[in-house]
Amino acid sequence: MITAVQKPIDEIAGMAFRHKRILIVGCGSCVTVCFAGGEKEVKTLASLLRMKAKMENRELAIDEITIERQCDHEFIDKIAALVEKADAVISVACGAGAQLIAEKFPNKIVYPGLNTTFLGITEQQGIWKERCQGCGSCLIDKTGGICPIARCAKNLLNGPCGGSSDGKCEINPETECAWQLIYDRLKQLGQLDSLEEILPAKDWTTSRDGGPRKIVREDLKQ
Amino acid sequence: MKSDSNLEKVLAGGGFAVTAELGPPRGADAEDIFKKAKLLGDCADAINITDNQTAIVRMSSIGAGILLKQRGIDPVIQVVTRDRNRIAIQSDILGAAAHGISNVLCLSGDHQKFGDHPTSRNVFDIDSIQLIQLFKKMRDEKKFMSGQDITVAPRLFIGAAENPFADPFEFRVIRLAKKINAGADFIQTQAVFDVTRFEEWMKLVRDKGLHQKTNILAGVIPIKSARMATYMKESVAGLKVPDEIVARMSGAKEAKEEGIKICIEIIERLKKIEGVRGVHIMAVAWESIVPKIAERAGLLPRPKTNNNSAVLL
């Protein structure tokens, strides 16, 4: 999923308090699952902002709505009337959702309520970890199912750097060395030989380096 | 000969090579380089210049290397992939080679988190092994990574680093083999303090015949104080300093002298290891001690080749 964390309340308030009436829009998919921008978080955020506005004697009306997905036109279309009523929108979706709202309502100011962070997994309740950078050309078939692009601090494709120690990465003793994980897994699979192969320089055109990306599926296009 | 490198010549002549490390200044200070060059020039076959080590901004390794060339000294230019993509790296190496620089040391580079610009973005377009391959391709095939032709190919003596003390231990020899297969003419190791573990690693290296395919230079660091020993043991990623050395440094009356003694003892043991072709002395911020260590470890005088008798400007 796409993971995100809510911005500090003061930062959000700094944006919200420029207006008299705001709409907070939550999203029912990824950010609901990672407890950053679902219905519950929208409610809490609205209460906090109301309280803060009251303490500072500010006039602020807040509407709340959470839609199924902020990254699809059809769900945003349904809230057009609510958006029109507000002076500004605080989107607590990922950056894609916040931008689609902005795109659909050119006259509305849209603020991000979240910091979108990574494509990751739920490690356990309250802990999420990055697993993918969406480079557009998956290579984990060669690395034991573990991605060195997303999980090695230096994106190394041919083994660990000299800073790998006791299975940990030099940048943080709590971060696992991706290449230790790859090594251990290939060993377990009896595939250590594959480590002798030199992986060539990556073609980054499929990644962000090729500019904003677009997927077109002719078979589905209408 | 692949290049005009003095280091390559000394190794090809069968000598036990000596290189020394030089950390460039944090300013546009040519005098600093000349001072260190004077200090190190006669006790090393080549001087290895770091490329913004620990991600702290310093004079560029190529810039400092050109200054060394002007003093008739053979530089080894470190090239990290942290700060430059394949376009910049290829362009820079053409410039360096045009200035007569031959030796390159291919590294990924310390993460910027450790440096003075921790908020910067890193590059890592390619890794250190791909960098070795790239330089070999430029030299041997006269081609850029793109496959397009180079008009005048850079004549390079290509180096790489290996850390026998990092983990996973068993992977370290595989990784060394990869670097050699990629085209590493010489290998500079992380500083050796635990000679016994280094000997074990060298045995694995010899079992694979890798010592015959490249030139392995073992790294050494002279320790200046007990504090430095403890710091390196506890805080420097990739270094393994045995307790015994920390104890010797703490117990010594003359810490500096003890550090020199330890360094010389290590060099003496390294000389005896089959497949070790030289030492690389890393006395960054203590360059003044290198002549004494080289002298007492019996590494002087350095062989004279046609290269290091170059005109002094």
Image (cartoon, rainbow, N blue to C red):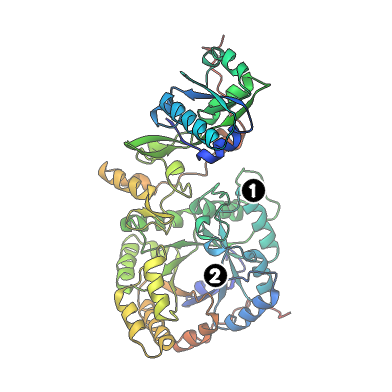
Label 2 close to label 1 by CB (< 8 Å): no
Give the vertical position of A33 relative to B116 (above or below): above
Identify the element where label 1 is drawn.
helix
Identify the element where label 2 is drawn.
helix
Of tags 2 and 1, the one toward the viewer is: 1
The chain identifier of the residue carrying mark 2 reads B
Report the quarter where the N terminus of chain B lies. bottom right
Q: Quadrant of residue A129?
A: top left
Q: Position of residue B75 (x, y in %)?
A: 60, 70
Q: Residue at x 25, y 44 (%)?
A: A188
Q: Position of residue B287 (x, y in %)?
A: 54, 80
Q: Which residue is mark 1?
A: B87
The chain identifier of the residue carrying mark 1 reads B
Q: Position of residue B198 (x, y in %)?
A: 34, 69
Q: Quadrant of residue A130?
A: top left
Residue B111 visible in the shown view: no
Q: Which residue is mark 2?
A: B8
Q: What is the C-alpha distance between the residues marked 2 and 1?
A: 27 Å
Q: Which mark is residue B203?
A: none
Report the quarter where the C terminus of chain B lies. bottom right
Residue B262 visible in the shown view: yes
> Foreground residue, B7 or B22?
B22
Q: Residue at x 37, y 60 (%)?
A: B166
Question: Mark 1 is on which residue type?
Answer: Ile
Give the vertical position of A49 relative to B268 (above or below): above
